[in-house]
Amino acid sequence: MRNVVETPSQGVPIVLTASATDMSDFNLSPFRAFTGGFPTNIIPRRLLRKYWYPPVPNNGDETAKYAPYGIRKIEALLIREFGSKNVAVARPDNLKEVVGPKTKIIGISSMEPAGIGFVSRTYTSFMGFGGEPMAAAEFRDLIRKPILRRWRAKIILGGSGAWQIHLAKLQRKYGIDCIVMGEGERTVLKIFRMALNGEEIPQIVETESPNPEEIPCIVHPSIFGTVEITRGCGRGCKFCSPTFRRSYSFPLEHILKEVQLNAKNGTKMILLASEDIFLYRSKEKFLPNREALVTLIRSIAAVPGVEYIQPAHASLAPVVYDPKMIEEIGPILLEKANWVTNGTRHSSVEIGIETGSIRLMNEHMKGKMLPYKPKEWHDVVTEGIEILNKNSIWPLATLIIGLPGETEKDTIATLELLDKLRHSKVFYVPLLFTSEEDCMLREARHMDLKYLTSLQWELIATCWEYNIEVFVSKSLQRKIRLAAMVAYALYYRWKHGRKVLRPIMNFSGWNKDRTRQIENLGT
Ligand code: SF4
């Protein structure tokens, strides 16, 4: 079953869409989708659209074959309520064919509409000369399409980045009638019904968490073959919004139904959406449930058509608590891996290291390492990564620079932790602290490049130095390092001052005695 656009010239009553970056699978690379936060002006967008984030294919009519998972969830609810003929999911470049006089609602989902999330703020400001983040530019292109206004349809915005439009005060400028913030399943039907009946709809809706039974299975395939295995977290990190969501695991039959739907429709990959795969049917105090997780991964791998399995997020404490669990799932993930680095095949998952400072762990995320204590954080990180690497899992790890209250000592602690991981297979993504609207630290000041200390620059440079050592071939490493020195001479010196010289020298291999300098800087 798929959407049927009966009379395209008249339009479909409810049209769902997303921007060009959200409507792409980045050539089947979920981690490459992070680059939606990179600036636009370096490579022309028409080339990026063609080669970097090409659009998902269509069904053979004007509807999209694959769509973001959040859109697919809302679509499933709307189809159940209003029928498949009344709902169409389309790419931005197909809106003219599905929007018409009968269209009453255009629902838009977005992850990064204003470019003020962690990745966008960090990498757009870091490059500086590149203009706004790609994801924000693409969202603006979408929201300014004349077809959106032509038939006076109501514009409803949802998705994980909806808060950005509210925070950036762009709702009126962008002509958005209603912003839905939070999980949509319990709330959106009411709003869509009101809009279809021509009633006034609220400008802002903060939703309630649904019960698991209220969440339908998707009925059309999702980008990356995304399938949600758990929702919520509850470890309580203060910079994070999913921690507020009710936490539960979906039943195995529900998950497999969505996997089968995606595989049958040629997604090739299954992306296991979760804040932490080890929360799947976990026991008290976040203890992992090895039997349940192994059964889940085995069952998904056995579905015909599943070529790749990509877990989205994981925490490290369960890895240390139950290494046997990793020994059991590691070979399956390797067999279904989509990553090859310098000739070595491996799997991957995103983890959060965030900081090496025990003080900041205690202050902002003391549940992250449960059942261990904050003071054991370095051991949890180093042991956890060692176990993952032994099982061919090379994680992508985020680090947050400039957490509220961060001092030089905290930054040194993070540098020390990185040095302990020196030869590990990890791809580091350092991010500037960003106070998102729906987290406990929403009142805290964002970190900005102009406030970065020499040590914090050192931390960023160290992350990229290690990334290049592990993930880039030797011949390319030399070119990148040379280019970094040229970029310093031509640009970074003028933009950020001499404090970036030492980190760039370290990064470029011109500075051999780094450890002693870190100590000196910190005293
Ligand atoms: S462990 Fe991850 S998902 Fe859970 S609260 Fe912390 S940052 Fe959020």
Image (cartoon, rainbow, N blue to C red):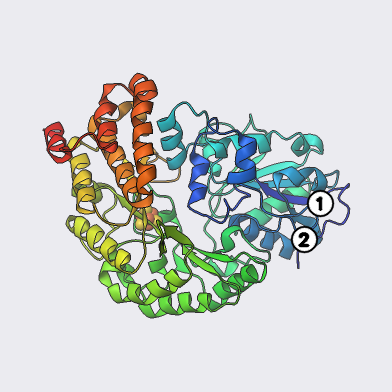
Q: Is residue 492 above or below residue 73?
A: above
Q: Position of residue 519 (x, y in %)?
A: 12, 37
Which picture quadrant has residue 246? bottom left
Which residue appears at 55% of the width and 55% of the height? Answer: 183
Name the residue at 50% across, 29% down. Answer: 130
* Residue that mark 1 sits on: 12
Tag 2: Cα neighbours inside 10 Å, few (<14), some, or many (≥20)? Answer: many
Front-most of 446 and 182? 446
In the rendered image, the residue lying farthest to the top is: 494
**Does 316 appear above or below 504?**
below
* Crowd class of label 1 (few under 14; some 14 to 19; many from 20; radius 10 Å): many
Please name the amino acid that badge 2 sits on: Asn
Front of the two marks 2 and 1: 2
The yes-or-no answer for disc 2 within 8 Å of ligand 1 is: no
Q: Which of the two discs, 2 and 1, labels the residue nearer the N terminus?
A: 2
Please name whichever residue, 116 or 510, is drawn nearer the observer in this view of the structure: 510
Q: Secondary structure at mark 1?
A: loop
Residue found 76% across the figure and 33% down from its top = 146
Classify the position of the C terminus by image quarter. Answer: top left
Q: Position of residue 46 (x, y in %)?
A: 65, 37
Amino acid type, mark 1: Val
Whole-percent x and y of residue 166? 54, 37
State if disc 1 and disc 2 touch (CB < 8 Å).
yes
Disc 2 secondary structure class: loop
Quick check: can you spot residue 254? yes
Q: Quadrant of ligand 1?
A: bottom left
* 438 displayed left or right of 111: left
- Residue farthest toward the front in the current orientation of the protein: 475
Q: Position of residue 439 (x, y in %)?
A: 41, 46
What residue appears at the point 67 percent right and 62 percent down from the top-left corner? Answer: 77
The image's mark for residue 3 is 2
